Amino acid sequence: MSPAGGTGRELRVLVGSPAAGLLPDASAPVPDGTILLDLGEDHPSRAGLLELRVWTDGATDPTAERVVRAEVRIGALHRGAEKLFEVRDYRQVIMLADRHDWHAPFAGELAVALLCEQQLGLEVPARATWARTLLAEHTRVASHLGFLGWLTDRLDPGLAVEVRGLRERLRVGLAGLTGNRVHPMVTQVGGLAVDPDPGWLRAETARLDGVPALAARLLDRLDTDAAITLLDGEGPAGSSAPSDGPTAALGPDLVAAFGVSGPAARAAGCVADLRIEAPYLAYAELADVLSTFPAAALPGPPGGAGRRFAVLAAELAVSAALVTACAERLSGLPGPVRVDAGKNLRLPDGDGYLCTEAPLGRSGVYLVSRGERTPWRLKLRTASFNNVAAWEAVLPGCRVVDLEAALASLGYVVGDLDK
Protein backbone atom coordinates (compact mmCIF):
# COMPACT_ATOMS: atom_id res chain seq x y z
CA MET A 1 0.00 0.00 0.00
CA SER A 2 1.45 3.38 -1.01
CA PRO A 3 1.36 6.37 1.33
CA ALA A 4 -1.81 8.44 1.12
CA GLY A 5 -2.85 6.59 -2.02
CA GLY A 6 0.24 7.78 -3.96
CA THR A 7 2.71 5.93 -6.12
CA GLY A 8 5.34 5.25 -3.47
CA ARG A 9 6.52 1.90 -2.16
CA GLU A 10 6.10 0.08 1.13
CA LEU A 11 9.36 -1.51 2.23
CA ARG A 12 10.03 -4.03 4.96
CA VAL A 13 13.40 -3.21 6.52
CA LEU A 14 14.93 -5.97 8.65
CA VAL A 15 17.82 -4.93 10.88
CA GLY A 16 20.48 -7.46 11.82
CA SER A 17 22.14 -10.32 10.06
CA PRO A 18 20.83 -12.46 8.63
CA ALA A 19 17.74 -10.67 9.97
CA ALA A 20 17.61 -13.28 12.72
CA GLY A 21 14.13 -14.45 13.52
CA LEU A 22 12.45 -12.33 10.85
CA LEU A 23 13.00 -14.41 7.71
CA PRO A 24 11.92 -18.05 7.51
CA ASP A 25 15.14 -19.14 5.84
CA ALA A 26 18.32 -17.06 5.98
CA SER A 27 19.68 -18.79 2.85
CA ALA A 28 16.63 -17.95 0.71
CA PRO A 29 16.63 -14.96 -1.67
CA VAL A 30 15.49 -11.71 -0.13
CA PRO A 31 11.84 -11.13 -1.11
CA ASP A 32 10.89 -8.14 -3.24
CA GLY A 33 10.13 -5.12 -1.12
CA THR A 34 12.44 -6.29 1.68
CA ILE A 35 15.72 -4.65 2.66
CA LEU A 36 18.23 -6.39 4.92
CA LEU A 37 20.39 -3.95 6.85
CA ASP A 38 23.47 -5.64 8.28
CA LEU A 39 25.35 -3.08 10.34
CA GLY A 40 28.35 -5.33 10.92
CA GLU A 41 29.41 -8.55 12.59
CA ASP A 42 30.28 -6.79 15.86
CA HIS A 43 27.47 -4.25 15.84
CA PRO A 44 24.96 -4.39 18.71
CA SER A 45 22.12 -4.77 16.19
CA ARG A 46 23.54 -8.10 15.01
CA ALA A 47 20.97 -10.08 16.99
CA GLY A 48 18.29 -8.98 14.53
CA LEU A 49 14.65 -9.31 15.63
CA LEU A 50 13.71 -5.74 14.75
CA GLU A 51 11.46 -4.80 11.85
CA LEU A 52 10.90 -1.39 10.33
CA ARG A 53 8.20 -0.59 7.77
CA VAL A 54 8.77 2.48 5.63
CA TRP A 55 6.65 4.10 2.95
CA THR A 56 8.50 6.08 0.29
CA ASP A 57 7.73 8.81 -2.23
CA GLY A 58 8.36 6.40 -5.11
CA ALA A 59 11.13 8.46 -6.76
CA THR A 60 12.44 6.71 -9.87
CA ASP A 61 16.06 7.53 -9.01
CA PRO A 62 16.94 4.97 -6.31
CA THR A 63 19.45 7.40 -4.76
CA ALA A 64 16.74 10.04 -4.42
CA GLU A 65 13.87 7.94 -3.04
CA ARG A 66 12.80 9.28 0.34
CA VAL A 67 10.93 7.96 3.34
CA VAL A 68 7.59 9.66 3.95
CA ARG A 69 6.42 7.49 6.85
CA ALA A 70 8.05 4.96 9.16
CA GLU A 71 6.64 2.41 11.58
CA VAL A 72 8.74 0.39 14.02
CA ARG A 73 7.57 -3.11 14.94
CA ILE A 74 9.10 -4.41 18.13
CA GLY A 75 8.48 -7.30 20.48
CA ALA A 76 10.13 -10.24 18.72
CA LEU A 77 12.57 -10.66 21.63
CA HIS A 78 10.16 -9.89 24.46
CA ARG A 79 11.17 -12.26 27.27
CA GLY A 80 9.05 -10.92 30.11
CA ALA A 81 12.03 -9.75 32.15
CA GLU A 82 9.91 -7.47 34.31
CA LYS A 83 7.61 -10.35 35.24
CA LEU A 84 10.58 -12.61 35.93
CA PHE A 85 11.87 -10.04 38.42
CA GLU A 86 8.71 -10.62 40.47
CA VAL A 87 9.66 -14.24 41.17
CA ARG A 88 13.36 -13.67 41.85
CA ASP A 89 14.91 -12.64 45.14
CA TYR A 90 16.94 -9.45 45.09
CA ARG A 91 20.27 -11.20 44.54
CA GLN A 92 18.81 -13.00 41.52
CA VAL A 93 17.17 -9.80 40.25
CA ILE A 94 20.57 -8.12 40.00
CA MET A 95 21.97 -11.01 37.97
CA LEU A 96 18.97 -10.93 35.62
CA ALA A 97 19.15 -7.15 35.25
CA ASP A 98 22.49 -7.33 33.44
CA ARG A 99 20.89 -9.25 30.56
CA HIS A 100 18.68 -6.71 28.78
CA ASP A 101 21.50 -4.50 27.46
CA TRP A 102 24.15 -7.15 26.93
CA HIS A 103 26.57 -4.57 25.52
CA ALA A 104 26.50 -2.68 28.83
CA PRO A 105 25.49 -5.36 31.34
CA PHE A 106 27.19 -3.78 34.34
CA ALA A 107 24.96 -0.73 33.95
CA GLY A 108 21.86 -2.88 34.40
CA GLU A 109 23.00 -4.62 37.56
CA LEU A 110 24.36 -1.37 39.01
CA ALA A 111 21.04 0.50 38.72
CA VAL A 112 19.11 -2.19 40.58
CA ALA A 113 21.71 -2.45 43.35
CA LEU A 114 21.79 1.33 43.85
CA LEU A 115 18.00 1.44 44.14
CA CYS A 116 17.95 -1.40 46.68
CA GLU A 117 20.62 0.37 48.73
CA GLN A 118 18.65 3.62 48.51
CA GLN A 119 15.51 1.93 49.83
CA LEU A 120 17.43 0.23 52.64
CA GLY A 121 19.39 3.35 53.58
CA LEU A 122 22.52 1.25 53.15
CA GLU A 123 25.87 2.99 52.73
CA VAL A 124 28.48 1.04 50.78
CA PRO A 125 32.23 1.31 51.41
CA ALA A 126 34.12 4.05 49.58
CA ARG A 127 36.28 1.48 47.82
CA ALA A 128 33.16 -0.16 46.38
CA THR A 129 31.89 3.20 45.13
CA TRP A 130 35.12 3.95 43.28
CA ALA A 131 35.38 0.44 41.86
CA ARG A 132 31.79 0.63 40.63
CA THR A 133 32.54 3.97 38.97
CA LEU A 134 35.54 2.45 37.23
CA LEU A 135 33.50 -0.49 35.94
CA ALA A 136 30.71 1.82 34.78
CA GLU A 137 33.16 3.78 32.62
CA HIS A 138 34.91 0.61 31.41
CA THR A 139 31.45 -0.50 30.26
CA ARG A 140 30.80 2.83 28.52
CA VAL A 141 33.98 2.53 26.46
CA ALA A 142 33.18 -1.04 25.42
CA SER A 143 29.61 -0.15 24.47
CA HIS A 144 30.55 2.95 22.47
CA LEU A 145 33.17 0.98 20.54
CA GLY A 146 30.47 -1.47 19.46
CA PHE A 147 28.38 1.30 17.90
CA LEU A 148 31.40 3.01 16.34
CA GLY A 149 32.30 -0.23 14.55
CA TRP A 150 29.78 0.48 11.78
CA LEU A 151 31.47 3.80 11.07
CA THR A 152 35.04 2.50 10.99
CA ASP A 153 34.10 -0.50 8.86
CA ARG A 154 32.92 1.90 6.16
CA LEU A 155 35.49 4.67 6.46
CA ASP A 156 38.79 3.17 7.60
CA PRO A 157 39.39 -0.61 7.76
CA GLY A 158 42.64 -0.05 9.66
CA LEU A 159 40.86 1.94 12.31
CA ALA A 160 38.16 -0.74 12.42
CA VAL A 161 40.79 -3.31 13.39
CA GLU A 162 41.94 -1.06 16.25
CA VAL A 163 38.39 -0.53 17.50
CA ARG A 164 37.65 -4.25 17.38
CA GLY A 165 40.95 -5.10 19.08
CA LEU A 166 40.42 -2.66 21.94
CA ARG A 167 36.92 -3.97 22.53
CA GLU A 168 38.27 -7.51 22.74
CA ARG A 169 40.99 -6.46 25.20
CA LEU A 170 38.36 -4.85 27.39
CA ARG A 171 36.39 -8.09 27.43
CA VAL A 172 39.50 -10.04 28.36
CA GLY A 173 40.18 -7.54 31.14
CA LEU A 174 36.64 -7.88 32.45
CA ALA A 175 37.03 -11.66 32.48
CA GLY A 176 40.27 -11.30 34.42
CA LEU A 177 38.45 -9.44 37.19
CA THR A 178 35.02 -11.09 37.20
CA GLY A 179 35.46 -14.43 35.45
CA ASN A 180 33.02 -13.41 32.71
CA ARG A 181 33.75 -11.73 29.38
CA VAL A 182 30.26 -10.29 28.85
CA HIS A 183 28.05 -10.54 31.96
CA PRO A 184 30.13 -9.53 35.00
CA MET A 185 27.50 -10.44 37.66
CA VAL A 186 29.64 -9.00 40.45
CA THR A 187 27.34 -6.30 41.82
CA GLN A 188 25.75 -7.03 45.18
CA VAL A 189 23.47 -5.06 47.45
CA GLY A 190 26.17 -3.56 49.64
CA GLY A 191 29.03 -3.43 47.15
CA LEU A 192 30.91 -5.77 44.83
CA ALA A 193 31.79 -9.45 44.91
CA VAL A 194 35.32 -8.77 43.62
CA ASP A 195 38.05 -6.33 44.59
CA PRO A 196 40.33 -5.06 41.79
CA ASP A 197 43.90 -5.70 42.90
CA PRO A 198 46.87 -3.44 42.03
CA GLY A 199 47.94 -5.65 39.13
CA TRP A 200 44.51 -5.54 37.52
CA LEU A 201 44.29 -1.77 37.99
CA ARG A 202 47.66 -1.27 36.28
CA ALA A 203 46.59 -3.52 33.41
CA GLU A 204 43.29 -1.65 33.05
CA THR A 205 44.95 1.75 32.76
CA ALA A 206 47.44 0.31 30.27
CA ARG A 207 44.57 -1.06 28.16
CA LEU A 208 43.10 2.41 27.92
CA ASP A 209 46.33 4.37 27.43
CA GLY A 210 45.77 4.69 23.70
CA VAL A 211 42.09 5.64 23.87
CA PRO A 212 42.56 9.46 23.73
CA ALA A 213 44.63 9.09 20.55
CA LEU A 214 42.07 6.68 19.10
CA ALA A 215 39.24 9.11 19.89
CA ALA A 216 41.16 11.94 18.21
CA ARG A 217 41.67 9.85 15.08
CA LEU A 218 37.98 8.97 14.98
CA LEU A 219 37.04 12.64 15.26
CA ASP A 220 39.51 13.56 12.51
CA ARG A 221 37.99 10.87 10.29
CA LEU A 222 34.51 12.25 10.95
CA ASP A 223 35.70 15.64 9.70
CA THR A 224 36.60 14.34 6.23
CA ASP A 225 34.64 14.66 3.00
CA ALA A 226 34.07 10.89 2.95
CA ALA A 227 32.44 10.94 6.38
CA ILE A 228 30.33 13.98 5.58
CA THR A 229 29.09 12.32 2.39
CA LEU A 230 28.35 9.06 4.19
CA LEU A 231 26.54 10.63 7.11
CA ASP A 232 25.13 14.08 6.45
CA GLY A 233 26.22 15.30 3.03
CA GLU A 234 25.41 15.12 -0.64
CA GLY A 235 24.12 11.98 -2.28
CA PRO A 236 26.22 9.75 -4.55
CA ALA A 237 27.51 11.17 -7.81
CA GLY A 238 24.67 11.39 -10.31
CA SER A 239 21.94 11.57 -7.67
CA SER A 240 19.08 13.84 -8.67
CA ALA A 241 18.34 14.77 -5.05
CA PRO A 242 21.14 15.82 -2.72
CA SER A 243 20.70 15.51 1.01
CA ASP A 244 18.64 18.26 2.64
CA GLY A 245 20.67 18.60 5.82
CA PRO A 246 21.53 16.20 8.63
CA THR A 247 20.52 12.58 8.27
CA ALA A 248 17.76 11.64 10.74
CA ALA A 249 17.95 15.06 12.38
CA LEU A 250 17.05 14.88 16.07
CA GLY A 251 16.61 18.30 17.63
CA PRO A 252 15.93 19.30 21.24
CA ASP A 253 12.16 19.30 20.62
CA LEU A 254 12.16 15.64 19.57
CA VAL A 255 14.59 14.76 22.37
CA ALA A 256 12.03 16.08 24.85
CA ALA A 257 9.03 14.57 23.05
CA PHE A 258 10.45 11.04 22.96
CA GLY A 259 12.53 11.08 26.14
CA VAL A 260 15.76 10.49 24.22
CA SER A 261 18.80 10.68 26.48
CA GLY A 262 22.50 9.91 26.55
CA PRO A 263 24.80 10.51 23.56
CA ALA A 264 21.90 11.07 21.15
CA ALA A 265 20.50 13.87 23.32
CA ARG A 266 23.93 15.42 23.84
CA ALA A 267 24.48 15.37 20.07
CA ALA A 268 21.29 17.44 19.73
CA GLY A 269 22.80 20.11 21.98
CA CYS A 270 20.91 19.15 25.14
CA VAL A 271 22.50 19.13 28.58
CA ALA A 272 21.65 15.55 29.41
CA ASP A 273 24.11 13.72 31.64
CA LEU A 274 23.08 12.47 35.07
CA ARG A 275 26.75 12.12 36.03
CA ILE A 276 26.81 15.94 35.99
CA GLU A 277 23.18 16.92 36.68
CA ALA A 278 22.58 14.50 39.57
CA PRO A 279 25.96 12.96 40.47
CA TYR A 280 25.95 9.46 41.93
CA LEU A 281 28.75 6.99 42.71
CA ALA A 282 32.00 9.05 42.70
CA TYR A 283 31.07 11.42 39.87
CA ALA A 284 30.81 14.51 42.06
CA GLU A 285 34.52 14.16 42.81
CA LEU A 286 35.26 13.61 39.12
CA ALA A 287 33.48 16.73 37.84
CA ASP A 288 36.72 18.22 36.51
CA VAL A 289 37.31 15.17 34.32
CA LEU A 290 33.73 15.15 33.05
CA SER A 291 34.03 18.83 32.12
CA THR A 292 36.72 18.03 29.52
CA PHE A 293 34.06 16.85 27.03
CA PRO A 294 34.59 19.07 23.91
CA ALA A 295 30.92 19.67 23.07
CA ALA A 296 31.47 22.90 21.13
CA ALA A 297 34.16 21.60 18.78
CA LEU A 298 32.69 18.35 17.45
CA PRO A 299 32.30 17.67 13.72
CA GLY A 300 28.92 17.23 12.07
CA PRO A 301 25.77 19.36 12.23
CA PRO A 302 24.00 19.27 15.61
CA GLY A 303 21.37 16.55 15.81
CA GLY A 304 22.63 14.70 12.74
CA ALA A 305 24.13 11.25 12.33
CA GLY A 306 27.67 12.62 12.10
CA ARG A 307 27.36 14.52 15.36
CA ARG A 308 25.95 11.45 17.14
CA PHE A 309 29.00 9.42 16.12
CA ALA A 310 31.26 12.32 17.12
CA VAL A 311 29.78 12.35 20.63
CA LEU A 312 30.44 8.62 20.96
CA ALA A 313 34.05 9.11 19.85
CA ALA A 314 34.68 12.07 22.15
CA GLU A 315 33.20 10.25 25.13
CA LEU A 316 35.76 7.47 24.72
CA ALA A 317 38.53 9.82 25.84
CA VAL A 318 36.50 11.17 28.76
CA SER A 319 35.62 7.68 30.01
CA ALA A 320 39.23 6.53 29.69
CA ALA A 321 40.30 9.50 31.82
CA LEU A 322 37.63 8.62 34.38
CA VAL A 323 38.86 5.02 34.55
CA THR A 324 42.42 6.23 35.09
CA ALA A 325 41.31 8.62 37.84
CA CYS A 326 39.36 5.83 39.56
CA ALA A 327 42.30 3.43 39.32
CA GLU A 328 44.62 6.03 40.85
CA ARG A 329 42.20 6.63 43.71
CA LEU A 330 41.71 2.90 44.33
CA SER A 331 45.46 2.27 44.43
CA GLY A 332 45.67 4.30 47.64
CA LEU A 333 42.26 3.55 49.12
CA PRO A 334 42.15 0.67 51.61
CA GLY A 335 39.07 -1.01 52.93
CA PRO A 336 36.43 -3.56 51.97
CA VAL A 337 34.37 -3.54 48.77
CA ARG A 338 31.11 -4.64 50.36
CA VAL A 339 29.05 -4.72 53.51
CA ASP A 340 26.97 -7.75 54.37
CA ALA A 341 23.30 -7.10 53.60
CA GLY A 342 22.28 -10.64 54.55
CA LYS A 343 21.13 -13.57 52.45
CA ASN A 344 17.41 -13.18 53.10
CA LEU A 345 17.22 -9.61 51.90
CA ARG A 346 13.87 -7.83 52.18
CA LEU A 347 13.22 -4.23 51.22
CA PRO A 348 10.83 -2.16 53.34
CA ASP A 349 7.27 -1.57 52.17
CA GLY A 350 7.02 1.23 49.64
CA ASP A 351 8.24 2.22 46.23
CA GLY A 352 11.27 3.97 44.82
CA TYR A 353 12.84 5.10 41.57
CA LEU A 354 16.47 5.53 40.59
CA CYS A 355 18.06 6.49 37.29
CA THR A 356 21.69 6.22 36.16
CA GLU A 357 23.58 7.34 33.06
CA ALA A 358 24.10 4.10 31.12
CA PRO A 359 26.13 4.17 27.88
CA LEU A 360 23.03 4.58 25.66
CA GLY A 361 21.28 6.98 28.02
CA ARG A 362 19.12 6.93 31.11
CA SER A 363 18.65 3.57 32.77
CA GLY A 364 15.81 3.85 35.26
CA VAL A 365 14.39 1.33 37.72
CA TYR A 366 11.03 1.69 39.46
CA LEU A 367 10.49 -0.79 42.27
CA VAL A 368 7.49 -1.53 44.48
CA SER A 369 8.11 -3.62 47.60
CA ARG A 370 5.65 -5.25 49.98
CA GLY A 371 8.36 -6.25 52.42
CA GLU A 372 8.95 -9.64 50.86
CA ARG A 373 12.06 -11.34 49.48
CA THR A 374 10.95 -10.57 45.93
CA PRO A 375 9.78 -7.26 44.45
CA TRP A 376 6.04 -6.86 43.94
CA ARG A 377 6.81 -4.86 40.79
CA LEU A 378 10.02 -3.84 39.03
CA LYS A 379 9.80 -1.68 35.91
CA LEU A 380 12.71 -0.76 33.64
CA ARG A 381 13.13 2.54 31.83
CA THR A 382 15.59 1.73 29.04
CA ALA A 383 17.38 4.11 26.68
CA SER A 384 16.97 1.79 23.68
CA PHE A 385 13.18 2.01 23.82
CA ASN A 386 13.18 5.81 23.62
CA ASN A 387 15.84 5.92 20.90
CA VAL A 388 13.91 3.51 18.68
CA ALA A 389 10.60 5.26 19.38
CA ALA A 390 12.14 8.42 17.90
CA TRP A 391 12.86 6.65 14.59
CA GLU A 392 9.28 7.20 13.44
CA ALA A 393 9.77 10.96 13.79
CA VAL A 394 13.30 11.34 12.40
CA LEU A 395 13.22 8.96 9.42
CA PRO A 396 10.59 10.75 7.28
CA GLY A 397 12.58 12.89 4.84
CA CYS A 398 15.60 10.55 4.88
CA ARG A 399 16.66 8.94 1.64
CA VAL A 400 16.29 5.19 1.60
CA VAL A 401 20.02 4.89 0.87
CA ASP A 402 20.71 6.75 4.15
CA LEU A 403 18.72 4.38 6.37
CA GLU A 404 21.88 2.53 7.40
CA ALA A 405 23.56 5.70 8.65
CA ALA A 406 20.38 6.85 10.37
CA LEU A 407 19.80 3.61 12.28
CA ALA A 408 23.48 2.99 13.06
CA SER A 409 23.82 6.44 14.62
CA LEU A 410 20.73 6.22 16.86
CA GLY A 411 21.65 3.03 18.63
CA TYR A 412 19.83 0.35 20.53
CA VAL A 413 20.24 -3.17 21.88
CA VAL A 414 17.24 -5.35 21.07
CA GLY A 415 17.10 -6.91 24.55
CA ASP A 416 17.07 -3.41 26.05
CA LEU A 417 14.27 -2.50 23.65
CA ASP A 418 11.93 -5.47 24.10
CA LYS A 419 12.89 -6.51 27.66
Image: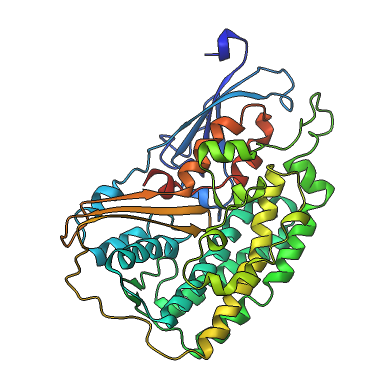
Residue 128: percent from left, percent from top = 41, 79
Left or right of 111 in this view: 266 = right
Name of the residue lying farthest toward the top: 5
User: How many numbered marks are there?
Assistant: 0
Q: Is residue 184 above or below residue 35?
A: below
Name the one closer to the observer, 253 or 322.
253
Q: Is residue 15 visible?
A: no
Residue 356: percent from left, percent from top = 46, 59
Q: Is residue 146 above or below residue 288?
A: above
Left or right of 355 in this view: 324 = right
Q: What residue do we see at 48% from left, 89% from top?
A: 333
Image quadrant where residue 392 sits: top right
Residue 363: percent from left, percent from top = 44, 54
Image quadrant where residue 127 sits: bottom left
Q: Is residue 323 above or below residue 30?
A: below
Q: Is residue 404 visible?
A: yes
Q: Is residue 378 above or below residue 315?
A: above
Q: What residue do we see at 26% from left, 80% from top?
A: 340
Name the one closer to the observer, 290 or 96.
290
Q: What residue do we see at 39% from left, 61% from top?
A: 111
Left or right of 156 in this view: 346 = left
Residue 417: percent from left, percent from top = 43, 45
The figure's colour scheme reads rainbow
Left or right of 389 in this view: 76 = left
